[in-house]
Image (cartoon, rainbow, N blue to C red):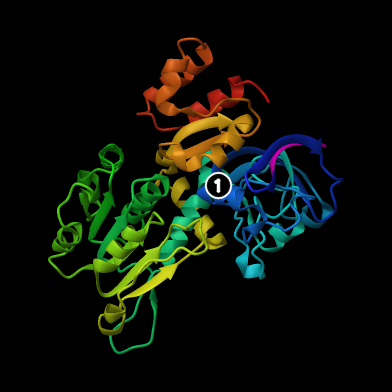
Amino acid sequence: MKTKAVRIYGKRDLRLEEFELPPLRDDEILANVISDSICMSSHKAALQGAEHKRVPDDIHIHPTMIGHEFAGVILKTGKKWEHKFRAGQKFSIQPAMAHTGTLDAPGYSYRYIGGDATHIIIPDIVMEADCLLPYEGDAFFPASLSEPMSCIIGAFHASYHVPPGKYIHEMGIRNGGKMAILAGVGPMGLGAIDYALHQPRKPSLLVVTDIDDNRLARAARLFTPEHAGKEKVRLVYVNTNTTEEPVRFLRDLTSGSGFDDVFIFAPVKQVIEQGDAILGFDGCLNFFAGPTSPDFKAEFNFYNVHYAFTHIVGTSGGNTDDMRESLMLMSEGKINPAVMITHIGGLDSVIETTLNLPKIPGGKKLIYTNISMPLTSLYKLGEKGKEDPFYSDLHEIVKKNDYIWSFEAEKYLLANAKPI
């Protein structure tokens, strides 16, 4: 079977190509990818090429498919897995298979599996690692977003606190504690706000910072302080760029005691050091955003490490249980990752989007891999609709849902967009 896929050959060398997939083996699964959301990690891999820890050294000879936040439909199952999976079944994939003892992951390391493709072959290791997850939802995009949500969930679970006088790590954010999400109104920050408000282990105070009033205003519309109050969480948004003495201001929100949990959602030295400065006793700094440079550094107050027991933790992706939790919370209607999406596009928009991701404003960029479509902001569909009724109709669907992507919008797109 032929596939169309975006493959990486080296630094900033991404190519959209059509080629033949090899014959399916008995321990593999053939699948059709429907949606993939583009992750900053893919941008970093595109910049670093073979220097990236998950990307093979020989991509100039054997290029690999990119994209790792994807969902689709199983087309054919090899004999080994017929007892567990079937043709027609929807799926999502957890790419982080670290528990298998390898950093290899779909979307980075393999020649025939990645999210930015029309058809893929899922290798045996994915099923052996229990990372191919059946999905029962109507829309495909929530399954794509279950991977980034699993990263958020994993970070929350990885944070920890240590009771005084003991050597036991109590895992998770402090229940009923004080929490800050710094640089927290990007797509992943929005997911973190959603999860913080709607999972069982909630903070009593949640402070979200950024330096962009427009992004802060959008976050406040999506997650209002009034709604947070119904969840028994005091939610405060702060623009640290326009606040005098932001460290003092933030600490004052905790009555001077500092925060139990601080999450860093941008790999910026000043943001990390600000997070360190607002930690309270036994405070945990969670460095969520991965930097591009392997030499990235920031200062940390070791006086407080010694006397105030502050500590730091970092995670790179979630695990399969985190992804299952993500899918469960979505199915129960407790979280809505659609708020992360601000742009949609087709497979032919992947290369430009991936290479320029930090320069493109907004949140998640969602790709539908079997269509041809330039990357388009949900807020710009109406402009394109002046010349094309396809965009006009899609605009009306999105507009009535407060410009939040939906199953109705996806269904219309898949039925009416130009095939690639």
Magenta residues, dominant SS class: strand
For the N terminus, the quadrant is top right
In screen coordinates, is 312 left or right of 5? left
Residue 4 lies in the magenta-colored region: yes
Query: Front-most of 36 and 276?
Result: 276
Q: Give the percent coordinates (x, y) of residue 416.
A: 59, 19
Type of amino acid at the residue the image marks with label 1:
His
Residues shaded magenta: 1-7
Which residue bears the numbered disc 1? 43
What residue is shown at x 80% (from left), y 37% (from top)?
Answer: 19
Query: Front-most of 271 and 388?
Result: 271
Q: Look at the numbered disc 1 and give the secondary structure of its residue.
A: helix
Q: Is residue 200 visible?
A: no
In screen coordinates, is 21 left or right of 291? right
What residue is shown at x 58% (from left), y 25% (from top)?
Answer: 373
Query: Front-most of 137 and 214?
Result: 214
Q: Residue furthest bottom?
A: 165
